[in-house]
Amino acid sequence: MKTLNKQSESRSILLVAFVSLIFMFSSCMDSTTPLNEVYIKGMAFMPATLTVTTGTSVKWTNKDAVSHTVTSDAGLFDSNDIAPNGKYSHTFSTVGTFNYHCSIHTSMTAKIVVNAPSTMSNYTPPSTTGY
């Protein structure tokens, strides 16, 4: 009977540990911003800097209770007002750093860094001569 109780206790501990791990993992997943997406939340752009490659479409989602804009400092793109729970997307086709702000709340600033896609086409393997 003692062996049965110990097995039952061990299974219960393992079950609690497993459920705890699932809970921790799921709560971490809920708090992160998806790839190529910027959340407007707490009167800030999150992340404040997002790095992508050319051809990437970035989506902004307004998670605040007030309207915001996504406005390029250089005048390259402008979302106009994004209502709460609204979305805006822009595709970046050139390499560079693109600073932007909310034209309603000008202290809100962020940037998108666009790099060329990395390729292996320029890769030259190390020489094996002499081995």
Image (cartoon, rainbow, N blue to C red):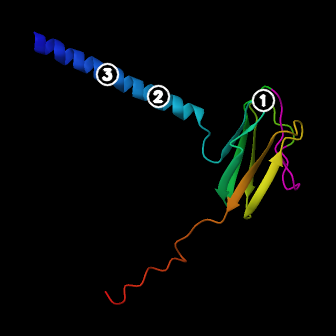
Callout in the foreground (1, 2): 2
Which amino acid is tagged 2?
Met
Which amino acid is tagged 1?
Pro
Magenta span main SS: loop
Q: Which mark is residue 14?
A: none
Depth order, front residue of 119/83 = 119
Q: CA distance from mark 2 to mark 3?
A: 14 Å
Quadrant position of the N terminus in the picture: top left
Query: Is residue 75 a member of the stretch shown in magenta?
Result: yes
124 up-or-down from 88: above or below: below
Q: Earlier in the sequence, mark 2 or mark 3?
A: 3
Task: Please report contact status of discs 2 and 3: CB closer than 8 Å, yes or no.
Answer: no
Which amino acid is tagged 3?
Leu
Residue at the disc numbered 2: 24
Q: Is residue 129 left or right of residue 73?
A: left
Residue at the disc numbered 1: 84
Q: CA distance from mark 1 to mark 2?
A: 28 Å
Q: Secondary structure at mark 1?
A: loop
Quadrant position of the C terminus in the picture: bottom left
Quadrant of residue 98 within the rendered picture: bottom right
Residue at the disc numbered 3: 15
Are there few (<14), some (14-19), or many (20+) residues within 10 Å of tag 2?
few
Q: Earlier in the sequence, mark 1 or mark 2?
A: 2
Question: What span is in magenta?
Answer: 66-79
Are there few (<14), some (14-19), or many (20+) residues within 10 Å of tag 1?
some
Which residue is at 35% across, 24% downward? 17
Which residue is at 41% across, 28% downward? 21
Task: Please report contact status of discs 1 and 2: CB closer than 8 Å, yes or no.
Answer: no
Callout in the foreground (1, 3): 3
Q: Secondary structure at mark 2?
A: helix
